[in-house]
Amino acid sequence: MKKILLLAGITLFGLSSYAQEKESKGLEGAWFATSQVGYQQTKTGDTKSTNLTVLPIVGYFISPSVAVAAGVGYINIKSETGSTTNANTGLIVVEPLIRKYYNVAGNLYFFGQLAAPIMSGKEKESELKVTQFGLAASGGFDFFVSKHFSVEFSYDLANFTSTTLDPKTGDKTTVTNFSLAHVASADPVYIDALGGSMPNLTTPLSFGFKFVF
C-alpha cells in the first residue's frame, strides 16, 4: 500500500511539474494566423479618396511573449469625382514584423510591434510606378476570446518611409517622410500622384481576428 501511495505521489508531482512548465511557456511554440484590415476615407465635395489595406499575417511565438511574423497583402488607394476615376493605385505589400506582448488583465494583452513593410505597384490611370520601404512602430490590444481565438486592434505610433514615384515619362520623385501617428504633411507631388491619399500608404488604424494553433 505504501508503495502504491508513493508511486501515486511521484506521478502527481510529475504531472504538476509538467503543468507548471507548460504554463510558464505560455504561447511559446504556437503558430498564429491573422488578417489586418484598415480603411480610410476623405471626402471633399464630389471627390472621394479611399485607402483600403488587407494584410494576412502568419507568425510564430519564439518565447512566451515574443512573436515573429510576416504578412503578404494588398493595398488599394483610389480617388473618384462622381463616376470619374482620378487615380487608382494597387500595391502588393510584404511585411516582416516582431511583436512583444504584455498582459494587462485576464485575457487582455497589450503589444508593441516593429515592422518593415515593402510595397510595390502601379497607379493604373497614369501608369505611374510606386515603390515604398520603411519602418513602422505600432501599439495595440489583443483580447483572447478563447485559447485559440482573439480580436486585436492596433494604431501606428511612428513611421519612416521612403517612396519612389516613377512616371511613364519624366524624372523619378523620391519622398522621404517621418511621422508620429500620421500627423506629418505630405509632399504635394505625392498627394497629387496618388489621388489625395495620406502621407503613408498604410492606414493608421487597423483591426483583425487572430487564430492560434
Image (spheres, helix red, strand yellow):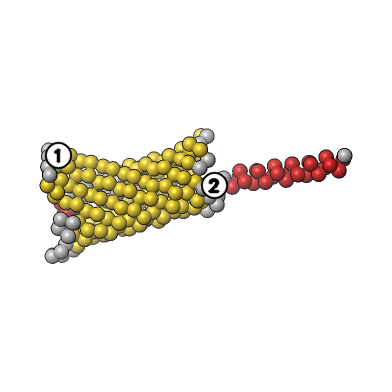
- Residue 8 found in image quarter: top right
The residue at 50%/42% (across/down) is: 148
- Can residue 140 be seen in this snapshot? no
- Which residue was labeled with disc 1? 44
What amino acid is at disc 1? Thr
Is 184 situated left or right of 212 in this image? left
Q: CA distance from mark 2 to mark 1?
A: 47 Å
The residue at 14%/50% (across/down) is: 86
State the residue lying farthest toward the front: 83
The residue at 84%/42% (across/down) is: 4
- How crowded pointer 1 is (Cα within 10 Å; few <14, some 14-19, many 20+) is rated as few
Is 113 situated left or right of 42 in this image? right
What amino acid is at disc 2? Leu
- Which residue was labeled with disc 2? 27
- Residue 48 found in image quarter: top left
State the residue lying farthest toward the top: 105
Q: Position of residue 158 (x, y in %)?
A: 34, 48
Q: Position of residue 59 (x, y in %)?
A: 46, 52
- Can residue 46 be seen in this snapshot? yes
Q: Earlier in the sequence, mark 2 or mark 1?
A: 2
198 versus 146 height, above or below: below
Task: Report the quarter where the N terminus lies.
Answer: top right
Nearest to the observer: residue 163 or residue 107: 107
- How crowded pointer 2 is (Cα within 10 Å; few <14, some 14-19, many 20+) is rated as many
94 versus 204 height, above or below: below
Q: Position of residue 199 (x, y in %)?
A: 24, 49
